Amino acid sequence: MTILNLKEYNIYIGPIGTELSRIIEAGNYSHVSLLVDENTHRHCLPFLTKKINVDYSVIEIGAGELHKNLESCRAIWTRMMQLGMDRHALLINLGGGVIGDMGGFCAATFLRGIDFIQIPTTLLSQVDASVGGKLGIDFNSIKNSIGVFRNPKAVFVDPTFLTTLPEGEIRSGFAEVFKHALIADAGLWNDLQAVGDWSSLDWLPVLERSLRIKQQVVEKDPFEKGLRKALNFGHTIGHAVESFSLKTDRPLLHGEAVAIGIVCESWLSNCAGTLPLAELEKITAFVRRLYPPYIFAETNFAEILSYMKKDKKNRGGVINFTFIRTIGQAEVNQTCEEKWIEESMRYYLTSMG
Amino acid sequence: MTILNLKEYNIYIGPIGTELSRIIEAGNYSHVSLLVDENTHRHCLPFLTKKINVDYSVIEIGAGELHKNLESCRAIWTRMMQLGMDRHALLINLGGGVIGDMGGFCAATFLRGIDFIQIPTTLLSQVDASVGGKLGIDFNSIKNSIGVFRNPKAVFVDPTFLTTLPEGEIRSGFAEVFKHALIADAGLWNDLQAVGDWSSLDWLPVLERSLRIKQQVVEKDPFEKGLRKALNFGHTIGHAVESFSLKTDRPLLHGEAVAIGIVCESWLSNCAGTLPLAELEKITAFVRRLYPPYIFAETNFAEILSYMKKDKKNRGGVINFTFIRTIGQAEVNQTCEEKWIEESMRYYLTSMG
């Protein structure tokens, strides 16, 4: 068990042991509830049950981004009240990003905030959502548009849960892992070049190094005023491609879209005169090797651009980017003309085709 | 203009001058919106308009506690999006407690939090809601059960707005003023004894002293872990009587109910062996002189008690009280048997009858 000491809480990386029960006992909570979706109820809760030695209630919601909305919050808050949860109750969120973001938001707003523990069960939520205190839901089709920043009591990152995931989910989460390398750790990037077969990968060191990068960035800029925007590398275009894909019959997972965004924004970084061509080509080849190509048409560019214009990172209507100067070094608050954004998508399509 | 320097923001007490525009300009906001209800739109906005020298949009909601709910939040968030408000936008909440609490909550959760300025227009919201960062809405009939703590960018407390209020609203807000005196400032309590005619009262020193008390208490305990509970004096029974009254044809204003709660909880304080009888009688006489009696029946006691049991200040089902040891000194985390709570309501009915 590796413990990452953040300013306000710890991340416990490794198989869940007695720490979880110790923290629950020390909190002397009036009530403990576990938020799950139908998948984590079936695949993850039986495993976790053996690790918790206090009584708890289970709150279940439907699985998937579709349920990350105000109606689900209403159902969760209502259930919390029915269970008699008060200010001294604890909510444990067992699941992927939807459960963590929405369960965290419900806890952070219930009676103006109760304690919550995050147990992310997907690679994406383990490396991305477990640091930074970003909580929230989708609203009016805009992702994460309603939410708050608030830190959990603790986070448990247990690679055991990764064995329950389909390969697509692993690939999706892995985009955040190599994004962390690209913005801040050239050494990790080099080590990741050896990745081939997911099932033989030793996840513990990868999780730990990736989480340390995110920790360093977030603690310097908890409320996303500047440096933290480095984490958005690949996400301006990635989010937009994701939103676009969700309305088609081939929806992308978040990280699959981010991998596309990383290729496009690396091209823009090169175009802006920073990232050397040889490094752009390495990144492109890496994505090509690990991710299936996503085919869309030039006629879709306008719709994808329209999503970028609604991005909450924008200021006064200008689309905000993070570029990389070189592998391992990010530059925040970059802008570029729309025609170059289109050109970057053309580059993606050509190089994957 | 008196400026109260809180840790994270200032409260400007006095007629609104150029400070408001200065703060808005300094914030370099991408968009400014003003949240009003139908009353403040008519009675307060025309006055404020002259003080703001930037373009702004107006968002209007229905007036009254009835509208302090998730549906109104949905409408406000949707409108904020339609107006193109981004992370760098500002929301100004112009109104009483509903506008301040709900508008603040909507701002604190919109894109994970944008700046907001509070301009409370009722006495209650000026002395109570403008310090402490408590934001939220009612949910499932439980008052303020969904919300967050977050501080505004600034608060403007302008007594000019008090001239627009009916006498009942003044009386309601005044309960918080004399509660502040009872828990922390015997000198203020003595000065308030002279209050007779509201219209001749010099509000500035009263507002300032009352706000200073709340500031001192809140800054020592921002998240209501201990000392801040002193502010709940009169509110355990007061809230419950208020909830009860809202379902009858004679609904009480919040402060009217708090005044009843103060009499009951002063009786309990005396009963617990702390507050001297002579002081209890002074408090009772004061409430009797300034507030019309509220008549309810012993058969209503059970319903009123049931509301107390749902209070979010409770822990593990035990009803939590703040008592006063003497005028000017509070004791938090007190409990008492249900029969004494009933007896205290009997005392109120007898002494007002």
Image (spheres, coloured by chain):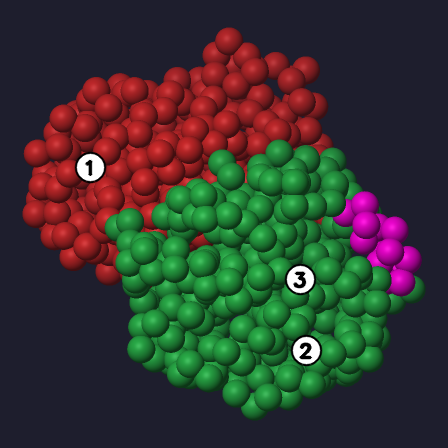
Chain colours: A red, B green
x, y (%) of residue A155? 26, 47
The residue depicted at 42 percent of the width and 81 percent of the height is B277
Residue A27, image quadrant: bottom left
Q: Quadrant of residue B69?
A: top right
* Mark 1, secondary structure of its residue: loop
Tell me the kind of residue under disc 2: Leu
Q: Main secondary structure of the magenta part?
A: helix
Query: How far apart are labels 2 and 1 at the CA level?
Result: 47 Å
How packed mark 1 is, by other alpha carbons closer than 10 Å (few <14, some 14-19, many 20 or more), is: some
Residues in magenta?
Answer: B37-49
Residue found at x 66% / y 73%: B289
Which residue is under mark 1?
A56
Q: For mark 1, name the chain.
A: A
> Is residue A291 at least partly visible in the picture?
no
> For mark 2, what is the residue?
B207
Give the camera-side residue of B142 and B12.
B142
Q: Position of residue B40 (x, y in %)?
A: 81, 53
CA–CA distance in space, label 2 to label 3: 23 Å
**Of callouts 2 and 3, which one flags the residue occurring earlier in the amino acid sequence?**
2
Residue picked out by circle 3? B292
Q: Position of residue B232 (x, y in %)?
A: 46, 65
